[in-house]
Structures are given as structure tokens and as C-alpha cells.
Amino acid sequence: MSAVKDATAAAQRAEKSLETRLTLLWHEIDPWQQDNHYIHSGYRPASNSYRNSARSLFYIHNETVNVYTHLLGAVAAVSGACALYRALGPRYATATHEDVVMFGCFFLGATICLGMSATFHLTSNHSPQVQKFGNKLDYMGIVFLIWGSFIPSVYYGLLQHPSYVRFYWIMITTNSVACAVAAVLDKFRSPAFRPIRAAMFVALGLSAIFPVVSGLKLYGLQALRERIALDWLVAHGLMYITGAAIYAIRFPERIWPGRFDIWGSSHQIFHVLVLCAAATHLVGMIKAFDFQHSQPYVTSDRLHLLDLPWF
């Protein structure tokens, strides 16, 4: 009887120790927290408390980089949106509400994506239910970012061809909804579907090739490089693809397990490349905006695409 009591007390002490430690090892965390077995340490204990999860902002763990890259990115997106809103009108007399809406789509998508991502990674140790819901929001945020990047690029690239713009807007919106629906399905979020998840979102991003092909047929390569800052858009796409590929194959931790638990894991690299890609896309949008408003066909009473009937 004494041995049983001693064993029970030891188990309780061990459980209490796990609760009070800031970080745990892979074999110490609950099964629902185990996603990447190449990451051996730095895991936060299950908190069952939003407040306790939020406290992890103030110490280092294996989600710190994931949280802060996109938390600070979301703040930067909101700040950038406010700054550009004040700058768009005075920059050109021909700037209209359409320009505000186009840049608004980009910043809305970026803010939602980065904000949802930061929230998910911060609260991922709360409970199985919260982690599951947050993971769905994380993927939906990626859809918002791609959609918000696509809409203005098509607008500035094909401004003189509203039928093309409407078609591609409908296409990307339909594809985005399909990806968002897939992202909330329980089967889709399992670790076994990691490569498929990455492939779907890469395919969604690669759908930007279609309006680029239309632009090449209409204007030619050199003109399109000026109209939509094609070089910047290509760089932006390559960053997304590279990040998704690194995330899918779990490099470099797959090669050196345990060495990138806190700094430099595949998910963190993906986060940084998402920020770089978003910034690159914004530069391209500003260049496209400048080009369009330097053309004689763009006047203050130019085609108001957003006011036209769609059918």
C-alpha cells in the first residue's frame, strides 16, 4: 500500500513539474501537440488558458519566431495601409477610390493572414480544440493573402480590358473559396496531408500565371514588366514557392534533427519568406500604380471598373 502511495505521489510531482516548466521535450508533450518529430525541444506545456498562452510572448520557445514574425508583420501591414492611404491621393491627381480599394485588398489580405497566423501559433498550446480551430484559421489566412495579392495585380495589369479583369477576379475568388473550404475539413489538417496542403496553396498561387499569359499576349513582355512590375511579381511568387517547399519537406531539421528547435526551422523560414514575399509584392504594386498613373489614358474620369455591371 505504501508503495502505491509513493508511486502516486511521484506521479503527481512529475505532473506538477511539467506544468510549471516553461518548455518541454518532444516525449513530454501531449500527442495532439506532436506535429514535427524533428523538433526535439522548446515545446510549451498545454495551457488550457488563453492568458497562460499569451504569457509565452515573454520567454523563448519553439514558437517564438513564428509568433513574432507574423505579429510584427501584421502591425507593419496596418501601419503601411494607413501611410499609403494618406499618400495615394496626393501622389497623383488621377488617383481614385479604385486605387484605395485595390491597395486595401492587399493590406486586408496581409493583415488577416499575418494576424491569424500569429494568433494560431501563440495559442496552439491551449488545447486540442483551440489548436484545431486555430490551424484552420491559419490556412484561411493564407487564402486571404493570395486573394488580396491577386486582385490588385490583375486590375493594374489589365486595366484597359475590364472583361479580362472580371473573369480573373471571379476565377481567383472561386479558387480561393475552394481552398478555404478544403482548409476547414478535419481530414485535410492531419500531418499526413502536409504535402497536399502545400501543393494546393502553391497551385492557388500559380493561378496568377493565367492573367500574366493574357497580359503577354496583349502587351508583350517588356510592356508587362512595366505595367505590373513583372520582375517583382516573379520574385514574390518564387519566395512563396520556396517557402512552401521548405515547409513541406521540413528542411533543415529533417537533416539535422534537434539543431533547429528554437531558431531556423522550416516553419520559421516559411514565415520569413512570406513576409519578404508580401513586401516584394507591395513594391511591385506601387510601381504598377506609378506606371498606370503616368499614362495619358489614365484620367480622373477614367474607366471606373468597380462601377460597371458584371453580367
Image (tube, grey):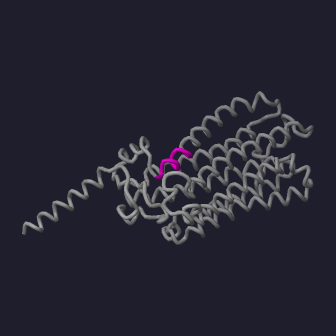
| 11 in the magenta segment | no
Q: Nearer the viewer, residue 289 or 239?
A: 239
Q: Nearer the viewer, residue 73 or 29?
A: 29
What residue is at 54 percent from the left and 63 percent from the top? 256
Residue 229 x, y percent position in the rendering: 82, 47
Give the residue furthest to the top.
90
Residue 198 x, y percent position in the rendering: 61, 64
Q: Nearer the viewer, residue 192 or 87?
A: 192
What residue is at 49 percent from the left and 52 percent from the top? 262
- Answer with the quarter of the image where residue 287 lies: top right
Residue 298 in the figure: left or right of residue 255: right
Q: Which secondary structure is most common in the magenta stretch?
A: helix
Residue 52 x, y percent position in the rendering: 35, 46
Residue 209 in the figure: left or right of residue 6: right
Q: Quadrant of the N terminus?
A: bottom left
Residue 237 in the figure: left or right of residue 179: right
What residue is at 75 percent from the left and 46 percent from the top? 306
Q: Nearer the viewer, residue 32 or 264?
A: 264
Q: How many marks?
A: 0
- Answer with the quarter of the image where residue 244 lies: bottom right
Q: Quadrant of the C terminus?
A: bottom right
Residue 183 x, y percent position in the rendering: 55, 63
Span shown in magenta: 62-70
- Answer with the quarter of the image where residue 299 lies: top right
Give the residue furthest to the left.
1
| 64 in the magenta segment | yes
Q: Is 51 situated above or below 195? A: above
Q: Is 84 situated above or below 14? A: above
